[in-house]
Image (spheres, rainbow, N blue to C red):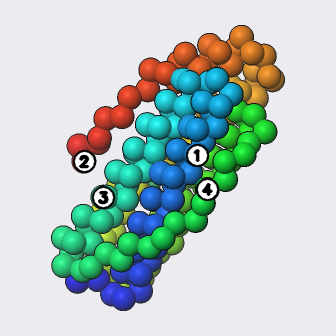
């Protein structure tokens, strides 16, 4: 059982995770449009990860014997200036998601909801990883300063990313 407040916030979060998945697909699509297929692959994998996050919350709510409410999604932006801009916006978005997870954790702690506190810890660690990955790539893109040969070499690196569902 979850409080109404916590359940509402988790339902909102499920929406944000699915939105993240759509946002990253829109970014993948942009990457294809500028012939950076490796970066497109990075965002397709990212979109799958976000769907996995949404499902993790979805399964948790059901385990707690509560009901998930699936809501409609906003249209994500599809226009970007360049690949660096895509990663700058990704970092911005991930920071927002981190703030959302912290908000959920604050409520769970206020309510001494120990099961939810334990469940959310995984997401707190996951956000540290997400932000670090995106920051690292953004830094490389900034240093590349538009140099197409460096961007293509990063693109080949990004092509190697595969989605492996976390086991925890
Ligand atoms: Mg996520």
First in sequence: mark 3 vs mark 4: 3
Could you say which disc has been placed on residue 26 in the image? 1
Above/below status of 32 relative to 155: below
Q: Which one is in front, 138 or 27?
A: 27
Mark 2: few/some/many CA within 10 Å (<14, 14-19, 20+): few
Residue 35 shows up from this direction: yes
Badge 1 or badge 3: first in the primary sequence? 1
Mark 4–mark 1 CB contact (< 8 Å): yes
Q: Residues within 10 Å of mark 1 (few under 14, many from 20)?
A: many
Q: Is residue 134 visible?
A: no
Q: Which mark is residue 168?
A: 2
Q: Mark 1 vs mark 3: give the one in front.
A: 1
Q: Residues within 10 Å of mark 4 (few under 14, many from 20)?
A: some
Circle 3 is placed at which residue position? 56
Tell me the distance, in whole angstroms, between the alpha carbons under discs 1 and 3. Answer: 22 Å
Residue drawn at point x = 47 percent, y = 37 percent:
44
Taking the spot 56% from the left edge, 24% from the top edge, the residue there is 37
Quadrant of residue 96 within the rendered picture: bottom right
- Spatial CA distance of label 3 from label 4 is 22 Å
Q: Residue at x 30, y 58 (%)?
A: 56
Labels 4, 2: front one: 4
Mark 4–mark 1 distance (CA, rounded to whole Å) = 7 Å
């Amino acid at each position: 059982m979850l409080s109404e407040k916590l359940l509402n916030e988790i339902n909102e979060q499920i929406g944000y995770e699915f939105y993240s998945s759509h946002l990253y697909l829109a970014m993948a699509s942009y990457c294809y449009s500028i012939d950076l297929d490796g970066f497109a692959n990075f965002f397709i994998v990212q979109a799958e990860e976000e769907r996995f996050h949404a499902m993790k919350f979805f399964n948790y709510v059901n385990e707690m014997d509560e009901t998930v409410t699936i809501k409609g999604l906003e249209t994500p932006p599809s226009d970007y200036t360049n690949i660096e801009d895509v990663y700058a916006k990704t970092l911005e978005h991930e920071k927002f998601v981190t703030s959302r997870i912290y908000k959920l954790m604050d409520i769970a702690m206020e309510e001494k909801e120990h099961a939810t506190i334990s469940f959310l810890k995984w997401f707190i660690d996951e956000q540290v990883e997400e932000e670090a990955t995106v920051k690292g790539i953004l830094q490389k893109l900034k240093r590349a300063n538009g140099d197409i040969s460096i961007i293509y070499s990063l693109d080949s690196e990004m092509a190697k990313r595969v989605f492996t569902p976390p086991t925890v």
